[in-house]
Image (cartoon, rainbow, N blue to C red):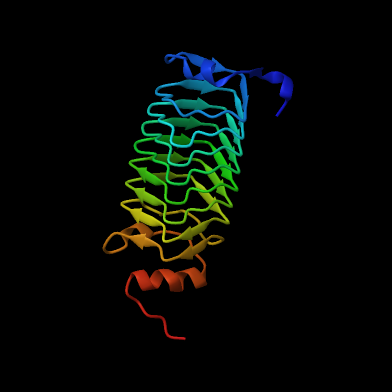
Amino acid sequence: MPSDRYRPIDAAECLDTDGDAIRLIRCEGLSFRNELSECDISDSFFAHCSFSGANLPGAAFRNTVFEGCDFTNAIMDDALFSCCRFVDCSFRGASFGRSMVRESEACDSTFAYAACSDTEIRRCTLRQCDFTETRFDDTRLTGTSFLDCRMTATEFFHTSLAGIDLSNCLLAGIRTSSGASELRGAIVDRLQASELARILGVEIKD
């Protein structure tokens, strides 16, 4: 990221936006713990910032990069992330209720124990991310790619995996609703098929 493109900003200035749009800012090592409700930030860069436990309902981030940021237990209900990039970020235990994430990328990040409820994830690429015990409830995964991700005890309820290629992901103990209709049309390899067959009550004989 070109360092001369952005205007340095302190936490107070960012927090006291009162809903105004902010563009072209660079934040490094800052902690945002107050409410950022309905903030509108675009074309910006955050490095090693903490949003841990932050309240971000209705926030909008567009064309923004986050590197090494901590969103642990953040509440991001009704938020928008559009054309964003997340590198080495933690969303452990975060809430994405009714949020939209579109045309964005996350790599080397963790979403363990996060909750996505009535969330739309559209045309995103998720690479080498951890989804251990992440809950996808009534989530729409449209044109989204999971590449070399960990899905251990990940929950998919009323979330269709049709057309989603999971063949290079680690799948273990995935949970679905009764009947496992969420798995219909998912793309997996033969070893994964054996794992998923157990969800359907099918025992594969060696």
**Can you tell which quarter of the image residue 148 is in?**
bottom right
* Residue 131: x %, y % from top left: 48, 53
Vertical relation: 69 (above or below) 44: below
The residue nearer to you, when weighing 72 against 104, is 72
Q: Which residue is drawn at the image coordinates 47% and 20% (left, top)?
A: 40
> Would residue 162 appear left or right of 70 to someone viewing this image?
left
* Residue 20: x %, y % from top left: 46, 13
The residue nearer to you, when weighing 159 against 10, is 10
Total marks placed: 0
Vertical relation: 4 (above or below) 141: above
The residue nearer to you, when weighing 133 against 85, is 133
Q: Which residue is drawn at the image coordinates 57% and 27% (left, top)?
A: 63
> Would residue 117 appear left or right of 50 to someone viewing this image?
left
* Residue 100: x %, y % from top left: 42, 35
Q: Which residue is drawn at the image coordinates 44% and 30% (left, top)?
A: 80
Q: In the rendered view of the protein, which quadrant contains the N terminus?
A: top right
Q: Which residue is drawn at the image coordinates 46% and 56% (left, top)?
A: 132
* Residue 28: x %, y % from top left: 63, 28
The residue nearer to you, when weighing 36 against 143, is 36
**Can you tell which quarter of the image residue 50 is in?**
top right
